[in-house]
Amino acid sequence: MNVGVNTTEPVLSLRGLSHRFVRNDGSEVRALDDVSLDVLPGEFICILGRSGHGKTTLLNAIAGLQPVERGEVHALGRPVRGPGTDRGVIFQRDSVFPWMRVEENVAFGLRVRGLKRRERLGLAREQLARVGLSAVARAWPRELSGGMRARVAIAAVFATDPPILLADEPFGTLDYVTKRQLQAVLRELWHRSGKTVLFVTHDVEEALMLGTRVIVVGNGAIAEDRAVDLPMPRTDDDLASPQGLALRHLLLRHMGLE
Amino acid sequence: MKLRANARLARIGGALAVFVTLVLAWQLVAELVAAKGSYGEPLVPGWGFLLGNALLRMSDYWDGSFGVPSPAEGGPPSYAAALLALGDATLITFERVVIGVAIGMAAGLALGLAVAASDLVRRLVAPSVHVLRMTPFLAMIPLFNLWFGATTFGIISFVAYGVAVIMFVGTVNAVRNVPRVYFDRAATVGASRVVTFRDIVLPAIFPEIRASMLLSFGLAWSLVVAGELLGAQSGLGVIVTYALQFAYTGRVLIVAFLFVLYAGISFAAFDALSRRIIAWHPQTDRTLRRI
């Protein structure tokens, strides 16, 4: 994809990110503790960690939705000062606008960009076809299941084609089967588009299934940073290979389970 | 389909049964309570008295135009004159409601949105909003009476004030209830403040705004009668004022029925008109359809 471009230049560069939250009782939480990280083009990085250890804060800091006390984020070489169209976000909470039909939801980012109705709805339908939702393009979100709404959110973010994709536990609330299906959808879209992805999850299996690299976050700091050298696309057999199992044990240990 | 039709039938049948029971219970109480008011009318009038004497005597309030004679000019009491009197008073009161609601809604909504547009102003205003909401509207009547007297302008102002408070509080709360993730999503695709307001805030708050509007219609009818009771020269409230002086319970009840009817009609009409706009809302299918 990036023939002729210097591919070693990081797409995202984090330097010394630190941030604290103050609880209602006055105690402090270190959500980010001196986090530095370089992300290369086309990487699919899974950020793994338990709840309340700073995963979402990290992602929001990169998205520009959460100002941090110290440190710098650079995206495509430019310092991040707020949200930007170079960084698409799939949110943890249901972000599909209930007052817009499915296709209008997917086209919203294009509408903001000033595309004409015909043009943006055409592009939206293309994206809906890729996530298998062509049949419900004119439906209201309330008529869709949670899994289908997650597909809408994915289609919406791919419609605007941002080079960087940030996903915050997008499948965290879905049932197992739906989750596996959507993992395949996202992996396929990533593979076709060559985007750089940061994917937050608390699910070890999900991280190993999707990531080219897994980063474990604990107490706001990076506890582990591992390339996942398993074939792509991955199968359950790959995860059960000696190499896959070794990685799995390593990650579980970092999560405090073994 | 058949199931739904049956359920509907059962619901209507149930409502009808309750209604008939209430009508009969009222009659029973009327038979049992023999107490009379100071001018000899029953304090709990039965249906015969209500639809006979009480309704007929409404012609007392007719001024004798359209060639229908009024009892004040020596004519006999007639149902024609009674209905004309009630219709005339209804039109006058209805006009006050409509103008008051229109002004109040516009003012409350505009103020609410202006406050909602700025985070800082919202935080400054929020505490006062709670005080306003807790202040009983009827406690403000003496003030309006002092300022405007019992004029049509005063009554309309009072209705507009009450409606504006409801709309203002409703709007400010509605904006506060918009989930943060919608704003975040808009920001990450580069939406400007104007676009965010138009495409996110306005549609997101509409269902709550609509609920406030429905509420304010019902409220407006109580506010207008409260305003008219304080010595207006025309309108349904005036009929009640006179009837109260002579303990004409029957006439008071007839006007009360009319108010229930009008409030119900305006509620249903606005509900039907505005329903299409919230076709997207998850509760359109269920809750709202049954109100």
Image (cartoon, rainbow, N blue to C red):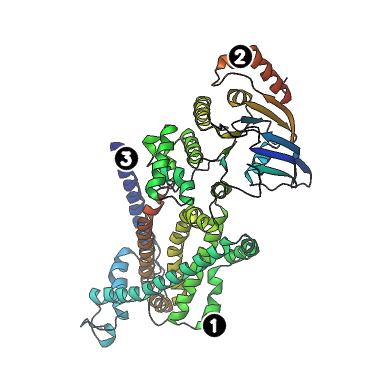
Horizontal and vertical percent for residue B255? 37, 70
Name the residue carrying label 2. A240
Residue B279: x and y in percent read 39, 49
Apparent side of residue A113 relative to residue B26 in the rendered image (left or right): right
Task: Tell me the number on the disc at residue B4.
Answer: 3
Q: Can residue B23 be seen in this view?
A: yes
Chain containing the residue with disc 1: B
Both on one chain, marks 2 and 3? Answer: no
Which residue: 41% across, 71% down? Answer: B97
Residue drawn where x is 30% and y is 71% of the image: B55
Which residue type does callout 1 highlight?
Leu
Determine the chain carrying the residue at label 2: A
Secondary structure of the residue carrying tag 3 is helix
- Left or right, B235 with reference to B190: left
| Position above or below: A120 against A249 | below
Q: Do labels 1 and 2 share a chain?
A: no
Judge depth for marks 1 and 2 and give the one in front: 2
Cα–Cα span, label 3 and label 1: 55 Å
Q: Which residue is drawn at 61% across and 18% down?
A: A230
Depth check, front residue: B237 or A76 = A76
Number of marks drawn: 3
Identify the secondary structure beneath mark 2. loop
Q: Is residue B237 left or right of residue B74?
A: right
The one nearer the camera, B116 or B53, is B116
Residue designated by label 1: B146
B48 or A134: nearer the viewer? A134
Q: How far apart are the alpha carbons under marks 1 and 2?
A: 84 Å
- Work out whether residue B277 or residue A169 is closer to the camera in this orientation and state it: A169
Where residue A164 sits, quadrant-wise, is top right
Q: What element does badge 1 sit on?
A: helix
Residues at marks 3 and 1, common chain?
A: yes
Which residue is at 38% across, 42% downward?
A: A122
